[in-house]
Image: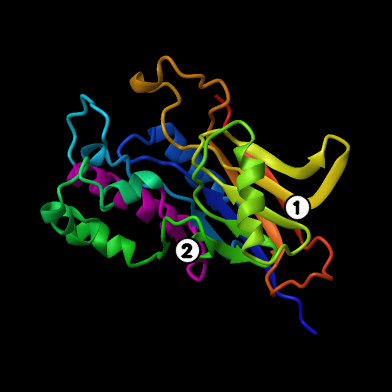
Amino acid sequence: MTVRKAKIAAISCSHAPFTPPATERWILDMLANVEGLTHFGHLGDVFEGAAASVHANEYSHTLSDEFDAAASFLKNIRSVLPHDCKRWINTGNHDDNIMVSDPRRIPKSLRSMVHWSNHPEFSEEAGNWQWLPYSKDKRAIYRVGQVHFWHGFDAGGNSDELEGLQMIAHSGWIPHSLAVRGHTHRPVPPTQAKRTARIPLPYYYANVGTCRPLSPDWAARKDRSQWGAAIIVVEAKWDKPSHLSGKCWDAELIRMKP
């Protein structure tokens, strides 16, 4: 029986139009040097969604500017990937804010008009990617064997582990699963979950951090000491695992040096 192997890379939280050129170059260089990629994922917050924020801001750019920047970023990524590499995007909360049913954001009568599907350049690029919804259930998960990818919802200090276990539960608690997300901007290497400090569980979690600037004005009073840009590279058995499978993946988190 032939065992299919996958090699997967993933990033998160680029927040167009704020991805620093140096970070984009680092991502492109890293991806170009990973041999045999079969999958690439952007785990969400492709856009800042500033025009749909409930928070006051002084940004001068428009949603159209965000769509332009995001289209260029995704197109550049696609240009360094193998032509047959499977590509997906997990919709993030900032992306979802643009169309969410919330009277504090974009008025209902305008939501369909500002959607990125109406922006010619981004709409064309978006068609090259598989999009998953922003939802806290299995619809939001991109899964390759024992490895699960989604954007993330909670941001507390131990939320990577807790939310990872929640999302792994949607697979039926397949042992040795790895849960990978972004959202918090804090890179975390593959780490084994624990029931207590001394009792490990057969589940793992990781976080790929952010691709946006690490010192935005709005976060001046927040703790950003753990923020960072990173890429995760995973080699995994592609086929559907069973409860009797051993650990069928190996992963490395690669951080960009400050």
Viewer-proximal residue among 199 and 244: 199
- Label for residue 87? 2
> Closer to the observer: label 1 or label 2?
1
Residue type, label 2 = Arg
Q: Main secondary structure of the magenta part?
A: helix
User: Is disc 2 placed on a helix, strand or loop?
Assistant: strand
Is residue 81 in the magenta section?
yes
Cα separation, mark 1 vs mark 2, equals 25 Å
Q: Which residues are magenta?
A: 63-92
Residue type, label 1 = Tyr
Q: Considering only order in the chain, which callout, 2 or 1, is on the residue closer to the N terminus?
A: 2
Left or right: 43, with 249 as reference point: left
Is residue 110 in the magenta section?
no
Question: Residue 59 is drawn in which quadrant?
Answer: top left
Viewer-proximal residue among 151 and 252: 151
Viewer-proximal residue among 179 and 130: 179
Q: Residue at x 80, y 70 (%)?
A: 243
Q: Residue at x 69, y 74 (%)?
A: 240
Counting from the top left corner in percent of width and height, residue 224 is at 51, 22
Counting from the top left corner in percent of width and height, residue 134 is at 42, 55
Number of marks drawn:
2
Q: Which residue is mark 1?
A: 203
